[in-house]
């Protein structure tokens, strides 16, 4: 289970909050895709376990077994934390998700490697200075990640459209005079170029853009359907904000998740 206990603000009232619930044992995990470093300290700050191991459930459970009762595990909110949080929830071990950027700003230090990082995470947790990251429910995470995958697709599409839009400039041709983002307005753009190589270059861009359009359409349809089940009422509420269409309102909805984590309306806007 992800622990969401007592919290205290830091750094001038920042909305990232510190987890301050006391525990007999504090564990810090520096987690990577294939390996992890685990450090467990007791209430007095003595190191009980500090080892490097394969990133898998069995090695972790073996390492924490002697201090499992009263243990809280802390891990940074990097892309590999899902399975660790699910394992802790299954085993009944409190798990705190730390905000990676704020954790780095707090503990600082010139020396940085995995054993030190895991010890620093455990020390931050023990001292009540572990800034918590926002935790989305498990059933929403895949859809939120799909929304985030949409961003590089949009950027790739824009990077292909820009040079096509300016194909008239090198040869001082008349401007295209129309928006070419839509497939219906792209006819005749490549034929404006006399050089066969330039013609072929635009055709290649069109093929890639058309493929991006298809991928974006398929993914957006899937995401809209998922959002209907996850948060139908907030979805329509966000959609009423002027300037936010269906897609952008859903992007905001999945990134905000829970308005209760923002102390003021200004924090939501920022």
Image (spheres, grey):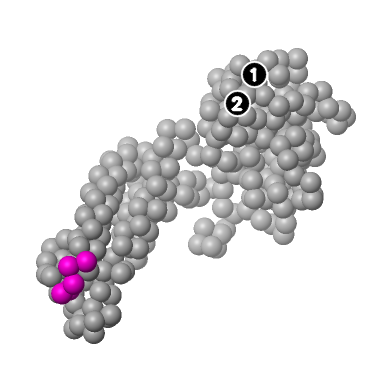
Give the residue displayed 60% in from the left and 44% down from the top. Answer: 133
Residue 220 disc label: none
The secondary structure that most of the magenta stretch takes on is loop
How far apart marks 1 and 2 lie (CA) works out to 8 Å
Quadrant position of residue 160? bottom left
| 249 with respect to 66 (left or right) | left
- Residue at image position (72%, 53%) is 105
Whether residues under marks 1 and 2 lie with C-beta atoms below 8 angstroms apart, the answer is yes
**Label 1 belongs to which residue?**
59
Residue with the mark numbered 2: 55
User: Where is 219 relative to 176, above or below?
Assistant: above
In this rendering, the answer to whether 43 lies above or below 101 is above
Q: Position of residue 131 (x, y in %)?
A: 68, 45
Q: Is residue 27 visible?
A: no
| Numbered range of the magenta stretch | 193-197
Q: What element carries label 2?
A: loop
Q: Image point 70% across, 30% down: which residue?
A: 37
Q: Where is residue 202 in the image (x, y as percent from the top left)?
A: 22, 64
Q: Residues within 10 Å of mark 2 (few under 14, many from 20)?
A: some
**70 in relation to 213, above or below:** above
* Image coords of residue 178 (percent x, y): 18, 75
How packed mark 1 is, by other alpha carbons closer than 10 Å (few <14, some 14-19, many 20 or more), is: few
Between residues 240 and 181, which one lies in front from this camera angle?
181
Q: Is residue 265 left or right of residue 99?
A: left
Q: Position of residue 93 (x, y in %)?
A: 64, 23
Q: What element carries label 1?
A: helix
Q: Residue at x 68, y 15 (%)?
A: 62
Quarter the N terminus occupies: top right
- Give the camera-side residue of 94 and 259: 94
Q: Is 171 above or below relative to 208?
A: below
């Amino acid at each position: 289970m992800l622990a969401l206990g007592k919290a205290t603000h830091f750094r001038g009232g920042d909305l990232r909050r510190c987890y301050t619930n006391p525990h007999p044992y504090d564990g810090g995990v520096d987690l990577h895709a294939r390996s992890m470093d685990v450090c467990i300290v007791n209430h007095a700050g003595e190191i009980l376990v500090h080892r490097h191991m394969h990133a898998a459930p069995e090695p972790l459970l073996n390492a924490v077994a002697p201090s499992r009762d009263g243990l809280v595990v802390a891990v940074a909110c990097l892309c590999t934390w899902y399975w660790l949080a699910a394992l802790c929830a299954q085993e009944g071990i409190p798990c705190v998700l730390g905000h990676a950027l704020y954790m780095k700003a707090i503990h600082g230090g010139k020396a940085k490697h995995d054993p030190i990082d895991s010890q620093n995470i455990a020390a931050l947790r023990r001292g009540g200075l572990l800034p918590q990251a926002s935790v989305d429910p498990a059933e929403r995470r895949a859809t939120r990640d799909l929304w985030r995958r949409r961003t590089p697709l949009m950027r790739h599409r824009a990077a292909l459209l820009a040079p096509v839009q300016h194909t008239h400039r090198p040869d001082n041709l008349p401007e295209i005079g129309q928006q070419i983002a839509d497939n219906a307005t792209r006819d005749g753009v490549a034929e404006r170029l006399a050089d066969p190589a330039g013609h072929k270059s635009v055709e290649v861009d069109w093929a890639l853009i058309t493929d991006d359009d298809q991928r974006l359409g398929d993914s957006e349809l899937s995401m809209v359907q998922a959002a209907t089940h996850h948060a139908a009422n907030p979805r329509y509420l966000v959609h009423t904000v002027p300037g936010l269409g269906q897609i952008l309102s859903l992007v905001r909805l999945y990134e905000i998740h829970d308005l209760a984590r923002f102390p003021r309306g200004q924090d939501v806007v920022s």
